[in-house]
Amino acid sequence: MASSAALSHSILSPLNSNSSNRTPESVSSFNRVSLPRISRSPLLSTQFKTSFIANCASTDDTSKVETPIELRYPAFPTVIDINQIREILPHRFPFLLVDRVIEYNPGVSAVGIKNVTINDNFFPGHFPDRPIMPGVLMVEAMAQVGGLVMLTPEVGGSRDSFFFAGIDKVRFRKPVIAGDTLVMRMTLTKLQKRFGIAKMEGKAYVGGEVVCEGEFLMAMGNSE
């Protein structure tokens, strides 16, 4: 019986061998390093479930199929189509260099696009081995977008043509090649209706990068 009692005492007190030398501090230290209790709090249980579900969901997201590139980008809107452009501008092939207007504020600004294709008539000569859109034609295309701003009743009244009076601070930043979409914004900055003189600022972009910019001075006049 004595041996059984001693065995039971040693099991219940694992530090019994030096129990006579233990201090209250050592006892409290032993209690602090005891195995943690498993919380049965419903809040912690809910947090664990939420975290587990979120981890599983993030794993499933990586397996989703990516949207094909042909479905990823929306088309430019059409505010003024090519038929309406032909009714406003006097230009015709091969010098009509605006295919569509995608934003239009009469008498204020316009944004037009020119789809640059290898079938454009200037590419065989500029250049045969490296098709680059001539800078002067970029300026001409921008001026035509400016004409769409000016040739409206709110700005030009009954006048139906315009001419270059001057260009300034024109810079070509990058070449424009076949396959690019030239996006041109022209903004009216000053207008003298009495003399039919307009000053405009223009920028042309390809893929969000400026390829050409400058200041345009144009004169309104009758078609005769």
Image (cartoon, rainbow, N blue to C red):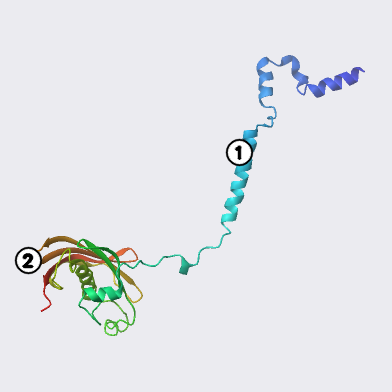
Residue 105 appears in which quarter of the rendering?
bottom left
Q: Between residues 76 and 17, which one lies in front from this camera angle?
A: 76
Mark found first going from the N terminus, 2 or 1: 1
Q: What residue is shown at x 19% (from left), y 70% (from top)? A: 147
Q: Nearer the viewer, mark 2 or mark 1?
A: 2
Crowding near the residue tagged with mark 1, few <14, some 14–19, many ≥20 C-alpha atoms within 10 Å: few
Q: Which residue is label 2 attached to?
A: 195
- For label 2, the SS is loop
- For label 1, the SS is helix
Residue 52 in percent (x, y) is at 62, 45
**The C terminus: image quadrant:** bottom left
Q: Is residue 180 visible?
A: yes
Q: Which residue is label 1 attached to?
A: 47
Q: Is residue 220 left or right of residue 37?
A: left
Q: Is residue 97 visible?
A: no
Q: Amino acid at mark 1?
A: Gln
Residue 198 in percent (x, y) is at 13, 65
Q: What residue is shown at x 92% (from left), y 18% (from top)? A: 1
Residue 168 appears in which quarter of the rendering?
bottom left
Residue 76 in percent (x, y) is at 36, 67
Residue 190 appears in which quarter of the rendering?
bottom left
Q: Amino acid at mark 2?
A: Phe
Q: Which mark, residue 125?
A: none
Q: What residue is shown at x 31% (from left), y 72% (from top)? A: 81
Q: CA distance from mark 2 to mark 1?
A: 75 Å
